[in-house]
Image (cartoon, helix red, strand yellow):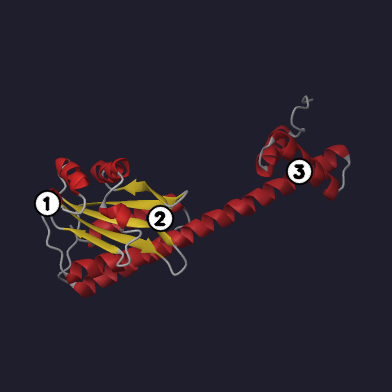
């Protein structure tokens, strides 16, 4: 469990880890970094990150321990729980000092207690533009969270949300750049092999994409690999 008695030291370590997160451009690696940050500095024993997808549903994307992952899965199965509700709560924080005596989420509380978990601090992950998900901080002991605990969780969540938003943007951006590069390569192959202009080669790619109901990038990958049009015999 993170030690909060020395705020200057915690702030320094938080800045170090947060800086490392910003330099990571892969969502998976960023999630692992967020969990490391949480377990080291937040009032918890295990942690999980749940990200929004689809129609606002939450999916546990990463967890520092299988118990934390299972605790959120139970919330999804029951349709109730602090980590689900925190995404919509205006306060952005849900505190559960004793899961076995949770009047707000009784069914989930009993099942989570059966996993050995006792208390929880759930914090919404969000930026100025949108809500990303939730950071779930679990403890195996009963914990009366104070103002410092909540503040620490909020600070970590803010840093984590910024890093995740950056990583998601970077990943999407680089996927788009990579796809564009692949389409350009495929165009070049078609131009050389069939004597086509750049526009004609792109038109061929687009036609195969539409006929096969496949993404342009995937058609381009096939052409780069085989150096032939889809369905055409090699040689």
Residue 176 circle label:
none
Residue 28 at x, y = what percent?
42, 49
Q: Secondary structure at mark 2?
A: helix
Q: How many residues crowd mark 2 within 10 Å: few (<14), some (14–19), many (20+)? A: many
Q: How many residues crowd mark 1 within 10 Å: few (<14), some (14–19), many (20+)? A: some
Residue 106 at x, y = what percent?
18, 48
Q: Which residue is mark 1?
A: 101
At x 12% / y 51%, what residue is drawn?
Answer: 101
At x 81% / y 45%, what residue is drawn?
Answer: 203
Q: Residue furthest bottom?
A: 8
Mark 1 to mark 2: distance in Å?
Answer: 34 Å
At x 25% / y 44%, what residue is drawn?
Answer: 71
Q: Which residue is mark 2?
A: 30
Q: Which residue is mark 3?
A: 206
Residue 81 at x, y = what percent?
26, 50
Give yes or no for contact between labels 1 and 2 (Cβ–Cβ under 8 Å): no
65 or 69, nearer to the observer: 69
Q: Secondary structure at mark 3?
A: helix
Give the quadrant of residue 44. Answer: bottom left
**Rendered-image quadrant of the N terminus:** bottom left
Mark 3 to mark 2: distance in Å?
Answer: 35 Å
Question: Mark 1, mark 2: which one is toward the viewer?
Answer: 1
């Amino acid at each position: 469990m993170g030690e909060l008695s020395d705020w200057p030291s915690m702030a320094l370590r938080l800045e170090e880890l947060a800086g490392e997160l910003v330099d990571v451009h892969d969502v998976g690696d960023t999630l692992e970094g967020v969990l490391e940050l949480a377990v080291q500095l937040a009032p918890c024993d295990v942690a999980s990150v749940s990200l929004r997808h689809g129609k606002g549903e939450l999916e546990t994307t990463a967890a520092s321990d299988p118990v934390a992952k299972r605790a959120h899965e139970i919330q999804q199965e029951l349709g109730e729980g602090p980590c689900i509700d925190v995404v919509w709560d205006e306060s952005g924080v849900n505190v559960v000092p004793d899961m076995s005596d949770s009047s707000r989420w009784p069914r989930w509380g009993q099942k989570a207690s059966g996993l050995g978990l006792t208390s929880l601090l759930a914090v919404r992950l969000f930026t100025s533009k949108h809500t990303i998900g939730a950071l779930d901080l679990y403890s195996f002991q009963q914990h009366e969270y104070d103002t410092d605990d909540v503040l620490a969780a909020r600070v970590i969540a803010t840093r984590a949300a910024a890093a995740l938003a950056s990583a998601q943007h970077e990943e999407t951006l680089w996927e788009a750049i990579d796809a564009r590069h692949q389409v350009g390569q495929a165009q070049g192959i078609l131009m050389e092999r069939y004597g086509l202009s750049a526009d004609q080669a792109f038109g061929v790619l687009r036609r195969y994409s539409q006929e096969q109901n496949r993404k342009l990038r995937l058609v381009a990958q096939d052409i780069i690999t085989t150096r032939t049009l889809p369905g055409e015999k090699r040689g």
